[in-house]
Image (cartoon, rainbow, N blue to C red):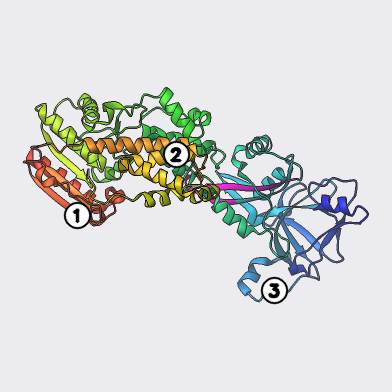
Amino acid sequence: MLQSIRQFASTLTLFNHYGPTEATVGVAMHRLDPACDYRRLPLDDRLDGMRLYLLDEQQRLAAPGQHAELYIAGPQLARSYLDAPHTAECFIERDGERLYRTGDRARYRHDASLEITGRSDRQVKVRGFRIELDEIQAQLAGLPGVAQAAVECLPKGELGQQLFAFVTLAPGHSVSVAQLHGQAQDRLPDYMLPSLRIVEALPLMGNGKLDRKTLQQWADQVQGGVGGALPRTPLEALLAETWAQVLGLERVGIEDDFFALGGHSLAAVSLASRLQTVLAAPVTVNAVFNAPSVAAFAALVQAEFKLSPLVRLSAPGAGANLFCFHPSTGHVQHYRALLPHLPHWQLWGLQKLGDDDTVGDGDIDGLAARYIEHIRAQQPHGPYHLLGFSLGGLLAITAAAQLERCGEQVAFLGILDSQYARSADEDSIETLLADATQALTANSQAVLRGLPAPAKTELTAQLAALPAAQRLPALAQWAQQQGLQLDGDSWEHLHTRLGHQQQTRQLLASFQPPRLHCPVQVWWADATLGAADFADPQWQQLSSGAYTREVVQAQHLNILAQPSVHQQLAAGLAALATDGAV
């Protein structure tokens, strides 16, 4: 503001005036020197009778240069507030003198003038360090090309208190967030580095002051600006989930930088630790620094790590093994919810996160055979205990059949909300087009809706001639060839995801219910049974062994989190011990 006034009204004499309402506004001022480039405006001329004190937390006088809280005394001081408790907090007695506690922090300069440096309520503790948000704000405002800066602090997941900064650029300047972040690193220690965003203007209230409430809302909504690039593979989906958990965000896009989203060195340690657990691989902190996005880290994993399909879920210890098969996501993290309820069992997960997704050519028998190799390397002979959720249930069934054909005993087969067919009618071509239109940018939606009637008729006929599973990939390819754009996504990412969906459909299509001899325990989510497209797979006919069926009040995706499932599974496995099948 000072620069603007000097530019457009260079002959004006300017005064910096300070005084809160509680001191009837006027307290101190300073006449600005036109030749001085002020970093902060000083105060050196007190109004008649007014006295200023800088006191530390023990209400002792602060030394020159020390940041402390500013107190005011003098004849202009208000008597009190109508709110008596608030009065006791802000108006105090010290050495027989009545003082007003301003909440402003200040320091004495070398020339004995006073400099306001921030607010006491703008002092926060981040990662064990007490810091001044306004000091960060001042450093950012001094960066080349920055016109204004505002900093807020909010609690965010495992990061604890997280710093957010919003800056505006000076006219004629162009700088990226990455460039600003690099410049900020030269001025601020790691624990004071905020997550940066460039905005057109900072929010102001009617009186021209910064609207801190709106800034906090902006900071709270930062996660809404990330996560545009969706995961393409099961590995990326698992990594994105882990990134979001550590950052305290709802979602993370695969191209979003961990550190640009507010991650710091301690958070990177936490992320590396989590990744070691979920990937069962030796992940170092340097790996996070070298590949800070989900996409980059997934590429690093594929290039440098040999991920085994078999991953330990339990801490090493005594107990029988329970092998858990992945659903269509490819990872086995949902099974960790079972660990507290099965303390005497060794849980293992069969995951599918590698780049060899063509194993078995989409054939469920080939995939199950690969998993059995790893299971038998860990446990050469039965009795085996198998558990599968969703697609994992079909894999567990197929694995059980192959083990029995090898003469091995399967003592337990658990199937959680698994089916391999749907009874719902196929969506019409019109429904497919309407749904697909919503995924496009506004301009591309207008282009598609304005498609000439002959072209639309031809497209509809081409899609209708294809099997239902091939229509969406074909439509995506056609839309890309027409130059249409996806909203917050890329065609490359979409085609990859559609490819994985096609592989899952191939696995489901290749499943043929075998004839087993082991005991079978089945859980259904009541929401699944009530769905319009539910087709009963008749699991009661699956085996000549004992059959148990449980219905749980749950949705498909949260059935593994239900206490009733935990209790029933623990009871079923405990019964095996009494039967000598463990």
Q: Is residue 163 magenta?
A: yes
Mark 3 packing: few (<14 Cα in 10 Å), some, or many (20+)? some
Q: Identify the disc placed on residue 80.
A: 3
Prevailing secondary structure of the magenta residues: strand
Q: How many marks?
A: 3
For residue 80, above or below residue 415: below
Picture quarter containing residue 182?
top right
In three-dimensional space, the C-alpha distance between marks 1 and 3, rounded to whole angstroms, equals 66 Å
Q: Amino acid at mark 2?
A: Trp
Q: Amino acid at mark 1?
A: Val
Magenta-tinted stretch: 153-170
Residue beneath disc 1: 551
Residue 231 in sight here: no
Q: Is residue 473 left or right of residue 196?
A: left
How far across and down, in percent of the image, does residue 326 sit? 28, 37
Residue beneath disc 2: 478
